[in-house]
Image: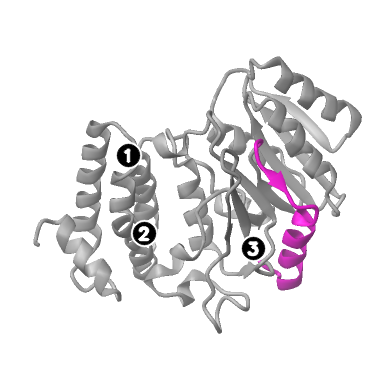
Amino acid sequence: MTISAVMPIYNTGEQLYKTLLSLLAQTEADFELLMIDDCSTDQLTVQIEETFARFDPRFKLRRNEKNMGAAPSRNRGMKMAEGEYLICLDSDDLFAPEMMEIYSRTLEENHAQIAIGSFLMKDIRTGETSLIVPQARPGITDRVFSLKELPDDGLNLWWPIAWNKMLRTSFLRETGIEYLALPGYEDLYFGFASALRADRIAYCPLGDALIIYLVGGSGQLSYRADPRSITRSIEKLLIEESSGNHAHAICQIMRELIMGVSQVLGRPAAEDQKQEYLELVKKLVAEYTTEDSFEEEACRIRRRELLGVL
């Protein structure tokens, strides 16, 4: 089997039907979809997933015994995966017909461990769209590359999310990377850890959106997530990278943490969570960086601000 797609499902309702239809229309037919139902209580969701599982053997339905959340559900699905390549998808997005074909071809032709693609962000309330394309670094990202070849901002070239990249299943199993069960931002550790440990990353052809990421739904909690999950993910990454004495990787991780503080503090969250988040950021900045850690002056300035020097 070529591709395994893992999809946690919880009360997605009518949108699930459109999502699964867009997978049914894929030009790459050699795939399995592992639908991990996380104890849905919505009967429409249950009926839709059961219908697809009944009429197409590629749509494999597995039910959790108890509600576990997206991260443990993804981890469960990844352990079941039989495909050479693996991608984690959300149950309320849409997929271009060539999505699986382009991702898998990029991996195969480049002998890559990770393939990263573009996506279209669409607000379902306003209809506004925005094409999100991985940032290019001429001479590096136009071939197979690794983060070791990129400067401090290497991790900022694409989003640390589950569904804008396809990976070799063997790479995931060799590295043991899994999703962290945290209240929000559960993609962050997985996205950064996989990129940091890969020796061969390749961009899919840029410009065409492979996935339509739908935002603005009433059930989406992306911007109400616990910001402390960010520092917990980053701390785990730093511990892992410092044990291998990977100084450049630590700089790349810390840049993302430092430069993201203003954005995170501007999002809705409980004030005590924000305060604890900020204190954890300061702790990590003091422990893992020095004044000369970063190439960018903006990072050095932000570091000083966080430590209260300015």
Q: Quadrant of residue 154?
A: bottom left
Q: Nearer the viewer, residue 218 or 146?
A: 218
Looking at the rendered image, the disc whose residue lies closer to the viewer, 3 or 2, is 2
Q: Percent x, y for residue 76?
A: 63, 34
Cβ–Cβ below 8 Å for labels 3 and 2?
no
Which stretch did the figure color magenta?
91-115
Distance CA(mark 3)–CA(mark 1):
30 Å
**Residue 256: assigned label:** 2
Residue 190 versus residue 37 in the image, above or below: below
Visible in this render: residue 199?
A: yes
Q: In this view, does 109 lie to the left or right of 298?
A: right
The way the protein has been coloured in the rendering is: one colour
Distance CA(mark 1)–CA(mark 2):
15 Å
- Residue at image coords 68%, 30%: 36
Badge 1 amino acid? Arg
Which of the two discs, 3 and 2, labels the residue nearer the N terminus? 3
State the residue position of label 3: 113
Badge 3 amino acid? Gln
Which of the two discs, 3 and 1, labels the residue nearer the N terminus? 3
Q: Residues within 10 Å of mark 3 (few under 14, many from 20)?
A: many
**Residue 228: assigned label:** 1
**Residue 16: assigned label:** none
Indicate whether residue 111 is drawn in magenta.
Answer: yes
Q: Percent x, y for residue 169?
A: 68, 52
Q: Which of 166 and 122 is in front in this view?
A: 122
Residue 149 versus residue 114 in the image, above or below: below
Label 2 secondary element: helix
